[in-house]
Structures are given as C-alpha cells and as structure tokens.
Image (cartoon, grey):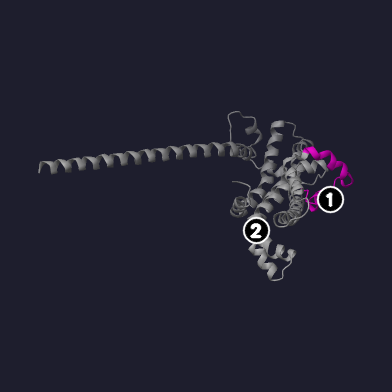
Amino acid sequence: MISIEKTKLKINELKEDQHFQNDTLRFKKNVKKFLLGVFRFLVIIGVSYIILAPLIEIFANSFFSDKDAFDPMIYIFPSHPTLERYKTAFIVLPYPKTLLISLGNDLALMIIQIFVCSMVGYGFARFNFPFKNVLFACVVIMIVIPTHAIMLPLYIALNGFYSTVVPFYLLTILGCGLRSGLYIYIFNQFFRGLPKEIEEAAFVDGAGSFYTYFRIMLINAVPSVITVAVFSMVWQYNDLFYTKLFGISEMVSMRISALTNEVANIFTVNSPALQQLYLYAGIVMIMLPVIIVYCVLQRYFIEGVERSGIVG
C-alpha cells in the first residue's frame, strides 16, 4: 500500500516536472519570438527612417516661408506655412505642359518596350536558334554595363537627331532603350516558368507563333507586363542621362534640374536657401504622378516582381 502511494507521488512529481519543463520551454519560445519581433520592428523602423526622412524633410520644407527658412529653431514644422513655392514652381516648370509632354512620351515608350522586350524574352524562352546563348549574354551585358560607358558612341551615332525624342524611340524599337536588357530578362524568366502544354495545345488547334504569343502567352504574362510597365514608366519619367545626352529640354527631369536657375533669373531669388525651397516644391509636384501610379498598381506590381524572377 505504501509502495503504491510512493509510486503515485513519483508519478505526480514527474508530471509536475514535465509541466514545469513545458512551461519553461514555452516561456523561452515566447521570449525568443518577442525579441525577434522587437528586432524586426526596429530594423523596419530604421530602414523606413533612412528612406522616408529625406522625403519628409523635402515635403515639409516646401511649405517654409522666408522667415522659416532663416530661423534655426524651426525644423520640419513651419511656423508660417505658405504655398508660394508651389505657385512659383507651377509657373516656372510650366507644370501642366511639361507633365503632359513627359507622360505622353513615357507612355508611348512604355508600350513599345513592353511589346519589343516581351517578344524578345519569349523568343529566348521558347525557341532555339543559332548563337542563342551569345545573344542572351549580350542582353546580360546590357544590364551590367553602365550607360555612361556607351555615352560617346550613342552621341556620335544619334547626333543627327539632337534636341528631339527620335533617339528614344529608335533605341526602344531596336530593344536597346532604357533598361531594356532588364525587361527582356524579366519576360524571359516568366515565360520559362509557364508550362509548354499551353503552346502545344494552341499549335494543335492550328495557331501560329504570333497568334499564340499575342492571344495566349502575352495575356498570361500580365503580372510581368505590369511590372515592366511600372519600371519603364518610372525610369523613363526620372531619366536625366538620356535627356541631357540628347538635349531634350521639355522633359520633366531637365525642367526640374534647371528650376533653381530659372527661379533666380525670373523672380530674382538670389539666396541659395530660398532657391532650395522652390526646388523642394518642384520635386513634390514631380513625385505625385509616380506615387499615384504605384498606389494604383501596387498589388499587381508586387505580384509581378515575385513571379518574374527578380527576387529569390
């Protein structure tokens, strides 16, 4: 009888030890999870601050008055906010005309790049032809080599079209436009991931290569199309290298780079600190279309990046 009670006591002690060990492990797991969450939160906050702090400062300073600009006690929040910087930048750019011209050209170039780069990427992904690997290596070289390395040959070859947008369209149609190598790579990776049975079924039904590409493959490549569309639109919109190289003064990037000089000459603003405030207002106005495009296409853009082989 005594031995049975001792056995029960030992069993209870073992159960209590087991519960204690389980509680200890659970506590350690929760503490570890909590610490990892805090660390992740701090990393996100730090990265967000690095990225957003300059943008917040630009946006806040664009509302500074002359008095706020020279007051060392004011930071971020202006004491006398004004819209004068935006009114002047709106006139100097001139904003509606410049925005319309830039977005019109960027939209046309984006559509051309989507069709040209998607066809080239589809050809690399689905067809075998002589020197395929060599040509694809050239595409990779287009991504790796900086554009400044080919600045002189480009200028010499296209000097006859100086101060026009013709070089933009020629390079884009020939698959050598801004970041075209990257777009070809994105489409190539996406088309390689699609099952070949889709094309085989189309070929059995009598569809040709072009019909299969336009009516089947390109429709299935909508995530990559949206990704390339966003990339192309934003990079064409922000491009300063090609616009300076070919002297295209009507683009947004050229207008914003000359904003401070025009403000100084037209409105006789000689203080560099005040000129900077007008530049901040112009930057905010220029960023608005890009932010709107990204907000509208954010979900599709992220999906396209995940499925096109850029990450991972």
Q: Tell me if 306 is positioned left or right of 178 in this view.
A: left
Q: Write down the region rendered in magenta.
A: 148-177
Image quarter of residue 259: top right
Residue 177 in the image: x percent, y percent?
A: 77, 48
Q: Single out the mark in the foreground, 1 or 2.
A: 2
Residue tagged 2? 222
Return the x and y of residue 265 as percentages of the image width and height: 79, 36
Our reading of the magenta stretch's main secondary structure is helix
* Left or right: where 34 falls relative to 195: left
Q: Quarter of the image holding residue 260?
A: top right
Amino acid at circle 1? Val
User: How many marks overall?
Assistant: 2
Q: Is residue 159 magenta?
A: yes
- Please name whichever residue, 224 or 65, is drawn nearer the observer in this view of the structure: 224
Q: Residue at x 60, y 28 (%)?
A: 72
Residue 84 visible, this angle = no
**In which quarter of the view is residue 286 placed?**
top right
